[in-house]
Amino acid sequence: MSRATREVRTVEPSTITRNEDLGEGWFLLEVHAPSLAPRVRAGQFVQVKVSEGDDPLIRRPFSVSDVLPEPGDGAERIQILYQVVGPGTRRMQRFRPEEPVDLLGPLGNPLPHPEVPSNGLLLLVGGGIGVAPLHMLCRELAARADAPPHKVLLGARRRSLLVGWEAFERLGVDTEVSTDDGSAGHAGNVVELARRVLDTVPAGAAAGIGCGPHGMNVALRDLSLEREIPFWISLENYMPCGFGACFGCVIPTPDGSRYRRVCVEGPAFPTSELPAVF
């Protein structure tokens, strides 16, 4: 039985405290959820009921990007980064402070905290909505006196789409960016930047976690296997139920012998356990 199935999941009537328009269709939703927030760990997600009625019927899954004021027992609020792409998120765009909202969570398994030597590097690679769990992970690492050396790489098509960049810098995390059009940072995709950074790390001293668009995830998987680097990919499969009942988010094992539910056995998997097509 996976760790996620043993944890207590609750439906918590919560209150919206903030729904900030970040531009380019991105929003930051903040919710007062004092019984849920202390239990959330980086990499886990919540299911948001976006309407009081049954249209849309299915909740929407979102990674938690932060808990406030600090991760742990004193947390009272959670933050969710989302992009308006369909009817559910268009409804969320209209959320206002003081409105109630129902959250189901925490769901999924937390991200690992890979250890690397003092001369090594834990590389955190994000693109698009994938920056959300990495920001929460950096918050957890910031609270550790023994945190491994780590660096964040963020990629986007252009500078205006580099959502969350400033949040990592406010945490004091070493952060580099890449843009396809060269408008900020490395001119090219973020996996090219990751390859360049890894060239500076001694052999056997690196590990990584990635989360982003499917093409980025596949390229990171291939890079990690090529370099024989311990690496985890947090998948963004659509998760209709969020707790394994519907089997709507499955991926096959590498040998194709069975399927794994991303929402229960993930969302993050070691790249060595990802199939050629996922």
Image (cartoon, rainbow, N blue to C red):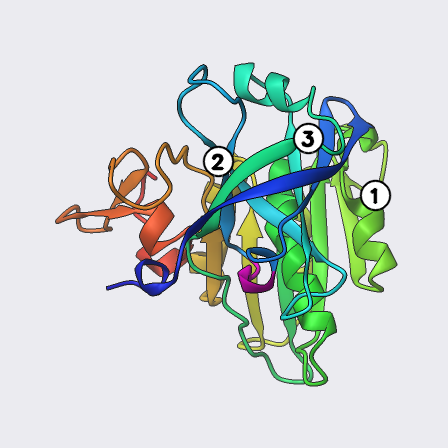
**Tag 1, which secondary structure?**
loop
Q: Residue at x 31, y 58 (%)?
A: 5
**Quadrant of the rendered image containing residue 242:** top left
Q: Which residue is mark 1?
A: 185
Mark carried by residue 214: 2
Question: What range of the chain is rendered magenta?
Answer: 38-42
Residue 168 location, x and y as percent? 79, 55
Give the percent coordinates (x, y) of residue 149: 70, 75
Sequence-first tag of 2 and 3: 3
At label 1, the amino acid type is Gly
Quarter of the image with the C terminus in it? top left
Q: Nearer the viewer, mark 2 or mark 3?
A: 3
Mark 1 vs mark 3, foreground winner is 3
Q: Which residue is mark 3?
A: 99
What residue is at 79 percent from the left and 63 percent from the top? Answer: 173
The CA span between labels 2 and 1 is: 22 Å
Q: Please name the predominant secondary structure of the magenta segment in the image.
A: loop
Q: CA distance from mark 1 to mark 3?
A: 39 Å
User: For the residue labelled by badge 3, is the local secondary structure a helix, a strand or a loop?
Assistant: loop
